[in-house]
Image: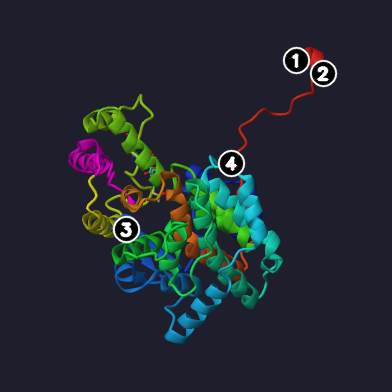
Amino acid sequence: MDISTLRGATKGLITLDSGYKNTGSCKSAITFLDGEKGILRYRGYSIEELAEKADFLEVAYLLIFGDLPNQEQLDKFHADIKKHSVVDDDVKKILDAFPKSAHPMGVLSSLTSALTAFNPESVNVDSEEDMYNAIVRLIGKLPILVSWTMRKKMGLPLYYGDSSLGYVENLLKMMFKQPNEEVYTQNPILIDALDKLLILHADHEQNCSTSTVRITGSSHAGLFVSIAAGISALWGPLHGGANQAVLEMLEAIKADGGDTKKYMAKAKDKSDPFRLMGFGHRVYKNFDPRARIIKKAADEVLGDLGVEDPILDIAKGLEKEALEDQYFVDRKLYPNVDFYSGIIYRAMGIPVEMFTVMFALGRLPGWIAQWREMRLNKEPIGRPRQLYVGETERAFKSIDKR
Ligand code: ACO
């Protein structure tokens, strides 16, 4: 039921739905998902088909502008993004000011906000043309910030990228190229796996970070700061931070002797706050369709790289035990996309603290699409109500009487 026009007529009646489990915040034509049936579609196209047949920038175009691009539209989109694949040198000074120990998500969110200062034309974007220009700017610049954030963490000098390469190949080179490396050799299996990971993360309707982007943008704050707000929301371990939390949990289990049964028991013990990270999902109550696709990619990457890693054995053990455990079966808790993405990122050599940054880059097109839809629909400023449960009116007490 659409009650959005009733507000003035409800005479103080408020729907209370903590966590917005059953509250719609908008109408959207971008992403359809059916958690019971495990269906995820972007603009009507199944996630399985997109992951198989499209690349990340095609999917980005689809999400943002509503249809798959023809060759001419795609070429222009690529060219416009490439034109803006530069970041002002002064942004490096901001990066330099962060300690090496800073969490990359905090750094990425800050630098994304800071880009506003260097791209003031991206703030007041009322026409579709202004929006387009802000969008291609951000899609061009974010991979640079991602790679700089990682290189800083790893103590590597910054690298500006190679404009002759595709988006994902360039990203990998910007992240991994070593200073003494004359020729950087690309691995097609890693390119394909990363492309798929970015596609699978590209949108997921009104989750915590996306709703944050929409609500921030609803005040007509600019695109870059709305996305920076989304990055901050994504950071938490119950949302995008879960992929980092998964690896940290696996490390902790290994350090404690690798007894997966002990941790299964902890996860089921209601007096213990521990949860099995990477299991469960607010909307997918049977399986996460993205997890199926990415599990296959994880197997390919591990096979190709010939990785032998006790952490991955622990992951496989937990996966098997959880799928056979009545507690997990009854609550429909299956491995989610973060469970497998963390495994792939680790095998690729990406530092654990960078995992959520990779998620953020994948989610960028979805956030942009949702922000653009919200602006084009001329949605009102987001302003939820509350149920006040505090003190009634009190007389002020002077400090000597408290
Ligand atoms: N380990 C153990 N028990 C769990 C787990 C878990 N990972 N997840 C849920 N449960 C249990 C709860 O204790 C609860 O049990 P009860 O009914 O006996 O009280 C029941 O399953 C339902 O849990 P809720 O918290 O009500 O489920 P909700 O839909 O609110 O939470 C969430 C979903 C946050 C993803 C949760 O499953 C969780 O914390 N998972 C671990 C963190 C994680 O992997 N997050 C990534 C989500 S995907 C993403 O953001 C891309």
Q: How far, Cα to Cα, is label 4 from label 1? A: 43 Å
Dot 4 and dot 1 residues touching (CB under 8 Å): no
Q: Is residue 143 left or right of residue 287?
A: right
Q: Name the residue under label 2.
A: 398
* Residue at far bottom of view: 72
Tell how many labels: 4
Q: How far, Cα to Cα, is label 4 from label 3? A: 35 Å
Residue nearest the viewer, comparing 89 with 166 = 89
The segment highlighted magenta reads: 309-337
* Residue at far left of view: 324
As helix, strand or loop, the secondary structure at mark 1 comes to loop
Amino acid type at mark 2: Ser
**Foreground disc of the pair 2, 4:** 4
Q: In which quarter of the image is residue 99?
A: top right
Callout 1: few (<14), some (14-19), or many (20+) C-alpha neighbours within 10 Å?
few
Rendered location of residue 283, percent (x, y): 37, 51
Rendered location of residue 86, percent (x, y): 59, 67
Q: Mark 1 points at which residue?
A: 402
Q: How far, Cα to Cα, is label 1 from label 2? A: 7 Å
Q: How far, Cα to Cα, is label 3 from label 1? A: 56 Å
**Foreground disc of the pair 3, 1:** 3
Dot 1 and dot 2 residues touching (CB under 8 Å): yes
Of mark 2 and mark 4, the one earlier in the sequence is: 4
Q: Mark 4 points at which residue?
A: 99
Q: Is residue 320 left or right of residue 200?
A: left
Q: Is residue 322 magenta?
A: yes
Q: Mark 3 points at which residue?
A: 290
Instruction: Identify the disc placed on residue 265.
Output: none
Amino acid type at mark 3: Arg
